[in-house]
Amino acid sequence: MRRGGFTTVALAVAWRSVHNYFRNPAIAVPGLLFPLFFFTAFAGGLSRVDSVPGFDYESGYTAFVYGFVLLQASAFGGIFSGFAIARDFESGFSRRLMLAAPRRAAIVAGYWLAALARAAFNVAVITAIALVAGLDIAGGGLDLVGLYTLALLVNAAALLFGSGVAMRLRTMQAGPAMQVPAFLFMFLAPVWVPYELLVGWVHAAAAVNPITLVLEAGRGFIAGDPVKVLPAFAVSIGLAALALLWARGGLRSAERAA
Amino acid sequence: MTRSTLALQVGMLARRSVVRTMRQPATIIPALLFPLLLLSINSSGLDSATELPGFPTASYFEFALAIAFVQGALFSASSAGTNVAADVETGFLNRLSLTPLRRVALLLGQLAGILALGLIQAVTFLTVGLAFGAGIAAGIAGAVVIVALSLVMSLGFGCIGAFLALRTGSGEAVQGVFPLLFAALFLSSMALPRDLIETDWFRTVADWNPVSYMLEGIRSLVIAGWDGEALALGFACAGGLAVLTLTATTAALRTRMART
């Protein structure tokens, strides 16, 4: 095996996945549509909520919602790439790929690069629309680096989680098993109002949901007032590391079945 | 063909449609679970919105309860569409077209499954709402009207799914339209009353969106009691949608049966 084998396989898998993504609207549209949907519905329909006593977010409701939608788009970029992996297994493509690839971890790396590309595209479109809609980003350059690095970590964690599920179940019917946990993690966080204004069981769930920290740190970066930065990065890296172990187990399972 | 023969045909196909729907947990469970989950998350996450001046109730749960009924009805589109598409894909409609079965019997029979699912959903949402402390301001009769309005909505949205399935013959195409129906829910007065929506374009969209009036019809019975205008608009929008989509579905069925 030549030394560049890992990179070559990863880039080939990534190129194929990105190519499929942009050539097939049925694959590309849902991943973009959902976050866009939420941004439009929340920023447009709920903007009055920033008048609620106790809602103290300086940059306004559009920026508050953008913080959530950015992470959601990143997570969905990863999860929808998990669907693509499942589809490749179902069609038999992955079986052939695993026979051909000298280092199979490169396949996962390739899918991650593709997930990164689709998340970057989704985030770019959503950010452009948010700016047109009046998004006010008060944070400076370093804040933006922090914000998008968090998004990148969430994307990696989601892709690795999705690929772990896809490689274990190897069927498109595994879609809900990827999507539902991602939805729950995202929505059991302070989506519409700050954590302090949540009530009931969602308040309790948000207290232990790691995404709450990531979301609050992201919103802090947008407002130019970073909060909980270290815990948020620790949690994001921890989630990505756990998901990496999960994906590695999935890869072993797929190798045994190949 | 006698009336009794038609009734027999409708009855047999309705039984098949209902049994098929009830035998698919993958259809029923999400159609019950997701609206309840959204209701629960929404009502905890947005409870502080009740502190906005002019908000019609002190309980966001009561305000949000109507969403479950409309979201549940949206699932009818997916359920009905998938079932009809399966009938097209498996050739069931082809075989039926060789029999003396009347189209109206086929259509009414298929719709029975939608209505059965709609009834289960409405009763479940109502029971959960009452169990978690929501009151129905319009009383028991109001609860019956809520179920009736839910069934009309299920019929309307279900016919959208059936229409798409008959036109395209593809379950995937039906699933692909599902997010667009969700857009109709999100771009309505789902989360706040229309007069509290601050963004002009969003309020305009919500004003023109029939889903707003379906929500407000149910919401009025839960929160305010008997509000003739809200109910008339709710039934007019849901009924109008049902008539429109039923007509379109009948035409699509005619074309589909002629093709086969």
Image (cartoon, coloured by chain):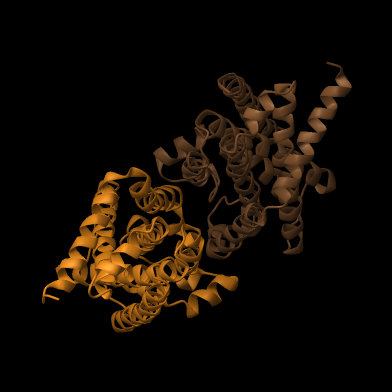
Check the rendered structure and report the hue given to chain B.
brown
In the image, residue B178 lies at what x, y percent? 51, 43
Quarter of the image where the N terminus of chain B is located: top right
**B132 or A162: which is nearer to us?**
A162
Q: Is residue B94 above or below residue A151?
A: above
In the image, residue B227 lies at what x, y percent? 72, 38
Q: Quadrant of residue B239?
A: top right
Please state if B173 lies on the left or on the right of B35 as rendered.
left
Q: Is residue B59 visible?
A: no
- Number of marks in the image? 0
Q: What residue occupies the far left of the structure in this picture? A: A3
Q: Is residue A25 above or below residue B241?
A: below
**B15 or A153: which is nearer to us?**
B15
Check the rendered structure and report the hue given to chain A.
orange
Which residue is drawn at the image coordinates 35% and 55% (left, top)? A62
In the image, residue A132 lies at what x, y percent? 26, 46
Which residue is drawn at the image coordinates 68% and 43% (left, top)? B218
Please state if B59 lies on the left or on the right of A36 as rendered.
right
Which residue is drawn at the image coordinates 50% and 38% (left, top)? B206
Q: Is residue B35 visible?
A: yes
Please state if B20 lies on the left or on the right of A118 as rendered.
right
Which residue is drawn at the image coordinates 76% and 49% (left, top)? B137
Q: What residue occupies the far right of the structure in this picture? A: B4
In the image, residue B210 lies at what x, y percent? 56, 34
Q: Is residue B196 above or below residue A158?
A: above
**A67 or A6: which is nearer to us?**
A6
